[in-house]
Image (spheres, rainbow, N blue to C red):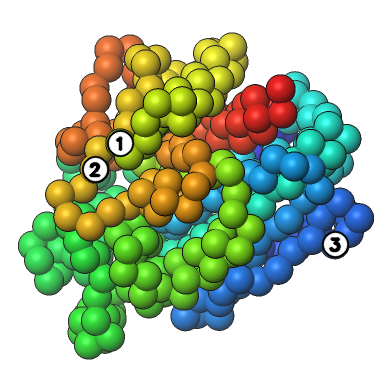
Amino acid sequence: MNWSHEEESYWFLSARDGLTRFRRLTYTHTKQCSLREIARSGSGLPVYALQLGSGPKHVAILSGMHGCEPSGPRGLLAWLDALLNHSRPFGISVDQEKVLKGSTLYVIPLLNPGGAERFSLHFPDCWHGTWLNGWTEANATKFFAEANEPEHFFYGTYAKKPPMRFTPDQIAQWKATGHALGSSLTDAGLDMWFDWDDTNGVETKGTKALLQAVRPSLVMDIHNFMFPTEVFAPTVYSQGEWAAEETTLARSLQESWRAHRLLFNHRPPRPYPKPSEKYYEDYWFYQLGARTLIVEVNGGMLAPEGAEYEPLPGQRPLTRRESLESAFLAAHALVTHELT
Ligand SMILES: [Zn+2]
């Protein structure tokens, strides 16, 4: 396979491998970085939170909520490596002193390790683009089945609708068919995206407890599903100066992608749509007092419908390297902008 230097260095091939790398990175920089386990998935995989720096700006960056969205966790690994080891992925260096003195960072790079582990079993290089060449209808169906089952099995559709949570009985029934749980779900069979209000998942509970304790003033969550790449801001709940700040932050991400000639939705940032019932993560971050950005790195033609989908001419699925770079730049632009 023809891998770039960045893919060779950061594109880990299983959740276990990724967790080992985050652990190793922390333990070789104990002065700058600490790591703690904030939850453990049903299959026994840890959810790690890294803490770096001691500055006044408290920033939280999350990724890997859905196991079938590989670019965020790997982009964060690349950015942390640039920060701690002075490597220069994509030709970019990170000013360690400035970042660690100016900010306190909380990074949860792999919110749903169980889902990511299942994804790697189905797509051995963790990139669906390699295994599902071209977004034909058949390939899209295959991908949705891998990510979202047993949704179709019980409800006749892969479309995600609340509560996106299956009972132990349903999961047992699904597993009895000989199939694995979808990789967008946690090991307990829930989609964390729909769990910010109910909070049934141990992964969601651990994440909320950490953020509630540290009260970040800024939260970014990186997903990797929509088409094209987009940063959503301000939240539908934000107003006035608050909303303006979120929009400015979102624009700094757009600028960064533009400078690196990466494809994205170049229209002015817009809010992530509000659900008809309950709420998503953006509301929870908002009520916590954090400015909020939801980033969706282009995951191919995976989501060609829905309220948040916006077809644009000239867009195409990103390569693995481009998606890695997009996630890396999102983290870099956010922290850099926050410190200026
Ligand atoms: Zn997602």
Q: Which residue is mark 2?
A: 274
- Quarter of the C terminus within the rendering: top right
- Quarter of the N terminus within the rendering: top right
Amino acid beneath label 2: Lys
Residue 275 point in image, percent of width and height:
21, 48
Judged from the image, the secondary structure of the residue bearing numbered disc 3 is helix
Q: Can you name the residue that lies furthest to the right here? A: 31
Q: Can you name the residue that lies furthest to the front here? A: 240
In the rendered structure, the answer to whether residue 95 lies left or right of residue 264 reads right
Residue 180 point in image, percent of width and height:
34, 72
Vertical placement of 226 versus 189: above or below?
above
Q: Which residue is mark 3?
A: 27
Q: Mark 2 and mark 1 in contact (Cβ < 8 Å)?
A: yes
N-term mark: 2 or 3: 3
Is disc 3 surrounded by few (<14), some (14 to 19) or many (20+) residues within 10 Å? some
Measuring 66% from the left and 71% from the top, which residue is drawn there?
37
In the rendered structure, the answer to whether residue 152 lies left or right of residue 16 reads left
Q: Gap between marks 2 and 3, in whole Å?
A: 40 Å
Q: Is residue 121 visible?
A: no
The quadrant in which residue 29 appears is bottom right
Amino acid beneath label 1: Val
Judged from the image, the secondary structure of the residue bearing numbered disc 1 is loop
N-term mark: 1 or 3: 3
Residue 195 point in image, percent of width and height:
34, 64
Measuring 63% from the left and 58% from the top, which residue is drawn there?
214
